[in-house]
Amino acid sequence: MRNIIVGFLGCGNIGCGVWKLLSEFENDIHHRSNVNFQVKRILVRDMKKKRDEIIPEELLTTCAADITDDPEIEMVVEFMGGEEPATQYMLRALENGKTVVTANKMALALNWHDLQATAQKNNAGLYYEAAVCGAIPVIRTTIDSLQANRIEAMMGIINGTTNYILTRMSQEGSAYQDVLRDAQRLGLAEPDPTSDVEGFDAAYKISILSSLAFHARVPFDVVYREGISKVDALDIAYGKEMGYTLKLLAIAKRDGNVIDARVHPTFIPREHPLSSVHGSFNAVFLHGHACQDMMLFGCGAGSAPTASAVVSDMLYAANREKPYHPTFSNENKLAEGLTVTDDWRCSFYIRLTASDKPGVMAYITSCLGEEGISIRNLMQREAVDGHAQIVLITHQAGECAIHKALDAINQGDAKVESLIRVEGK
Ligand SMILES: NC(=O)c1ccc[n+]([C@@H]2O[C@H](COP(=O)([O-])OP(=O)(O)OC[C@H]3O[C@@H](n4cnc5c(N)ncnc54)[C@H](OP(=O)(O)O)[C@@H]3O)[C@@H](O)[C@H]2O)c1
């Protein structure tokens, strides 16, 4: 049996989950892979902290070099979170030729080029299945199982917190702030929810996923990002009436050399497979030229599901003769020859309030018509205080054209209250 000496960077939610899975599943791992993982040291911040698992005290350290610089440690598994010092510690471990397994999407999305270059230079492996969508094997599926495909589009619900919030807003008609408070009380949202609700977390993940899917680095900073904190329950209700479900989608599309990558609240038709992904579940829907449509669904976070991905990476690394490195040029900028567009095409949901007088509707349609935009669905509500509520969904149009049309509408007797993009057939 091959004994692999391992160091942990961190031992919180995920670290304890990995410890537990390695302990409980030890015999199966021995039997299936002929590998024994022996955890030698664990980096933490506070040696006295009570943990979910009973960890032998002599394993804990507050000195990262006890792990990154220990020649006996062959594999370093990182679940500290945050960009720094996690990135520096992983770089150090890679410089020392150690395999690194990480669950840290932020550190990876922001510093992938450095981490990968260092891994390659030192013939070390870098693995990150757990960094995107917890237990769902979306990284390995993209790299291995779909390698005979040109992936043209990916749309994902890849943040469980926001999906939980939007699901409850939709089912109960509750306001965003009320559901967020509840999610925080239940431990489903962080005390500072910014990374989740403003779409940063999903943007890190789609940057990683789309780079692998398109075989070209799509850096985090080219991903358009809009969160859910301004979503109004009224729009969710109107969308529902018109047959749509609101989700925070991470979207990446490639058409020739033009890419668009974005995270924003999105209406999808009720019949679309992503529409039935509720609560904190995650799913990625993709289209490849050969595999056609496909959806991967499962637990995108949590201690045990994420540990499933981490331990799978540890085994994947242990069983490879040579480390895996992506074949595209992994730099901190968009690959040469590619462009990112902010003028993507989709349909648009628009809610307006308008003076309840003749000609207003004609004015709105003419502003849209000027930009070549036509209306697919229209709904009008009774006027209150002389103001009518108009909700419409356009046919496919360009992002820039829509903004021009809305600017023109706002100059007249109507006011645009919300704009939400619509995807899916
Ligand atoms: N939670 C999820 O469901 C989930 C899912 C997928 C991926 N991830 C990723 O997994 C990573 C860890 O998440 P988590 O929920 O396990 O976080 P967590 O519970 O906060 O655990 C972080 C661990 O790292 C240690 N740590 C943090 N900063 C440190 C520093 N500067 N020096 C030494 N130790 C330090 C902490 O030590 P102490 O224990 O002493 O404080 C703790 O043990 C993150 O990158 C996250 O994005 C999480």
Image (cartoon, rainbow, N blue to C red):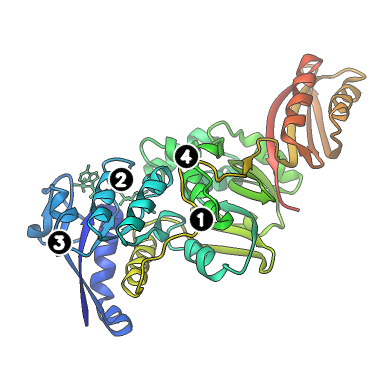
Look at the numbered discs 3 and 4 and tell me whether their residues touch, using CB distance below 8 Å: no
| Residue corresponding to mark 3 | 71
Q: What label sits on residue 328 in the rendered view?
A: 1
Which of the 4 image quarters holds residue 296? bottom right
Coordinates of residue 119 in the picture (x, y in percent): 33, 56
Look at the numbered discs 2 and 4 and tell me whether their residues touch, using CB distance below 8 Å: no
Can residue 190 be spotted in the picture? yes
Mark 1 or 3: the one toward you: 1
Coordinates of residue 401 in the picture (x, y in percent): 77, 30
| Residue corresponding to mark 4 | 200
Mark 1 surroundings within 10 Å by alpha-carbon count, few (fewer than 14), some (14 through 19), many (20 or more): few
Nearer the observer, 298 or 320: 320
Q: Earlier in the sequence, mark 2 or mark 4?
A: 2
Quarter of the figure with the N terminus: bottom left
Residue type highlighted by circle 2: Thr
Q: What label sits on residue 87 in the rendered view?
A: 2
Residue type highlighted by circle 1: Phe
Look at the numbered discs 1 and 3 and tell me whether their residues touch, using CB distance below 8 Å: no
Mark 4 surroundings within 10 Å by alpha-carbon count, few (fewer than 14), some (14 through 19), many (20 or more): many
Q: Earlier in the sequence, mark 1 or mark 3?
A: 3
Mark 4 or 1: the one toward you: 1
Coordinates of residue 175 in the picture (x, y in percent): 55, 35
Coordinates of residue 169 in the picture (x, y in percent): 57, 42
Mark 3 or 4: the one toward you: 3
Q: What label sits on residue 420 in the rendered view?
A: none
Nearer the observer, 122 or 113: 122
Left or right of 401 on screen, residue 338:
left
Q: What is the spatial separation of the Cα atoms under label 1 and label 2, in whole angstroms?
A: 21 Å
Q: Earlier in the sequence, mark 1 or mark 2?
A: 2
Determine the secondary structure under disc 1. loop
